[in-house]
Image: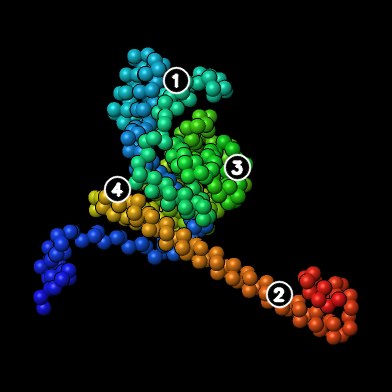
């Protein structure tokens, strides 16, 4: 049968075009049932370098550890804080990809005189130079990612990040919402965060640039938290009882800080159900990552073949999860309301029975709503 009007013909279907010459819309990637069925309060969002790089791609320091150290080194050189030989030594280490944690540690030590007064260190100045004016460097597609994260937070999800920046907090402030930045130096607040008493707080496990004294590059930098058994127990309970959703993280689970906090004391990791959203990219690398993560209880999910696919995918996922979360809360409310109604009916029946038995001092025998007591006066 020949095609008529605007209906696509067989030839149109073969070439992937409709009769008006427009290409078909890209078929959205399906959402994994075990992930989209989660409620926001069942999730802990783990935000990695990939998210910050997507939000503000023009800031090299947000893209990688190496990019951050290079940016700090450039700032130190601009402020004339290093001798020529010292700067050459650091540049050589970066070029040769020496242990970046050690390079960063040595650079920070060089910029920080031996004093406990953080204000007197040049490290703080370099940090502020590197992360200067982040608000103006956010791109719209990146803001869409942050909007989805913020929406899940407001519906009960917890958020932690390995990043030093505060892009999420800045975006929230622009939307008229206040988020608190936490780091591991404040054990009391970290404990409250793990107990879900500070849901609108972002836990920066490496620290945040606005508090240089809280920045840690190695587990030795936060021994106070590691030694606090109450805090550690609550943190590890999160990994055992909730689902972590890794965004822009790659190999974050190999991060020594993350391992010390969540993985080392958790047994039977493969019995857990966590998720990692990644770009499919190289097929062999994707398969390798998926196999490696399954042993840690993490399902690796592809959001698409391009980085640009993530915002739309995550937006659809957020809408699905948030809808289920609201449905769940409404159902709980109905159940609670139904239970309360049954209790009042039961109490009302008790009152009628007691009244029939001429028991006048009702309050001694049953806890009765005031409006029912008035009814039987």
| Helix, strand or loop status at disc 3 | helix
Q: Nearer the viewer, mark 1 or mark 2?
A: 2
Q: Which residue is mark 3?
A: 189
Separation of disc 2 and disc 4 at Cα? 54 Å
Q: Residue at x 33, y 33 (%)?
A: 60
Image quadrant occupied by the N terminus: bottom left
| Helix, strand or loop status at disc 1 | helix
Residue 186 in picture, x, y percent from top left: 59, 38
* Quarter where residue 370 is shown: bottom right
**Could one spot residue 104 in this view of the protein?**
no
**Above or below 301: residue 179:** above
- Identify the mark nearer the N-term, 3 or 2: 3
**Above or below 167: residue 273:** below
Separation of disc 3 and disc 2 at Cα? 39 Å
Crowding at mark 3 (Cα within 10 Å: few <14, some 14-19, many 20+): some
**Above or below 89: residue 186:** below
Looking at the image, the residue that sits furthest to the bottom is 356
Residue 328 in picture, x, y percent from top left: 52, 66
Separation of disc 1 and disc 2 at Cα? 69 Å
Q: Which residue is mark 2?
A: 343
Q: Residue at x 26, y 61 (%)?
A: 27
**Above or below 240: residue 345:** below
Separation of disc 1 and disc 4 at Cα? 37 Å
- Identify the mark nearer the N-term, 4 or 3: 3
The answer to whether 23 appears left or right of 285 in the picture is left
Q: Which mark is residue 307?
A: 4
Q: Which mark is residue 110?
A: 1
| Helix, strand or loop status at disc 4 | helix
Q: Which mark is residue 208?
A: none
- Identify the mark nearer the N-term, 2 or 4: 4
Q: Residue at x 38, y 55 (%)?
A: 315
Q: Nearer the viewer, mark 1 or mark 3?
A: 3
């Amino acid at each position: 049968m020949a095609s008529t009007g605007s209906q696509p013909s067989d030839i149109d279907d073969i070439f992937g075009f409709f009769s008006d010459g427009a290409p078909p819309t890209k078929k959205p990637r399906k959402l994994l049932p075990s992930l989209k069925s989660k409620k926001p309060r069942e999730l802990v969002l783990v935000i990695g370098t990939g998210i910050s790089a997507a939000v503000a791609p023009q800031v090299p320091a947000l893209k990688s550890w190496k990019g951050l150290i290079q940016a700090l080194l450039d700032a130190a050189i601009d402020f004339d804080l290093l001798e020529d030989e010292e700067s050459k030594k650091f540049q050589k280490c970066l070029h040769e990809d020496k242990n970046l944690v050690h390079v960063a540690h040595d650079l920070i030590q060089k910029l920080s005189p031996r004093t406990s007064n953080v204000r007197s260190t040049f490290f703080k100045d370099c940090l502020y130079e590197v992360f200067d004016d982040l608000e103006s460097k956010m791109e719209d597609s990146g803001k869409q990612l942050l909007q989805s994260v913020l929406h899940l937070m407001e519906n009960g999800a917890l958020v932690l990040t390995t990043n030093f920046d505060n892009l999420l907090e800045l975006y929230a402030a622009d939307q008229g919402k206040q988020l608190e930045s936490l780091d591991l130096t404040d054990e009391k607040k970290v404990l409250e965060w793990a107990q879900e008493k500070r849901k609108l707080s972002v836990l920066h496990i490496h620290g945040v640039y606005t508090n240089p004294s809280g920045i840690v590059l190695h587990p030795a930098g936060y021994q106070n938290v590691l030694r606090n058994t109450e805090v550690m127990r609550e943190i590890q309970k999160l990994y055992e009882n909730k689902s972590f959703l890794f965004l822009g993280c790659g190999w974050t689970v190999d991060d020594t800080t993350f391992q010390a906090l969540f993985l080392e004391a958790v047994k039977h990791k493969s019995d857990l159900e966590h998720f990692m959203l990644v770009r499919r990219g190289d097929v062999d690398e994707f398969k390798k990552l998926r196999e490696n993560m399954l042993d840690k209880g993490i399902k690796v999910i592809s959001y698409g073949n391009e980085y640009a696919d993530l915002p739309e995918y995550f937006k659809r996922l957020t809408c699905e999860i948030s809808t289920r979360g609201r449905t769940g809360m409404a159902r709980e409310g109905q159940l609670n309301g139904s239970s309360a109604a049954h209790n009042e009916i039961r109490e009302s029946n008790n009152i009628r029975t007691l009244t029939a038995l001429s028991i006048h001092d009702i309050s001694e025998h049953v806890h009765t709503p005031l409006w029912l007591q008035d009814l039987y006066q």
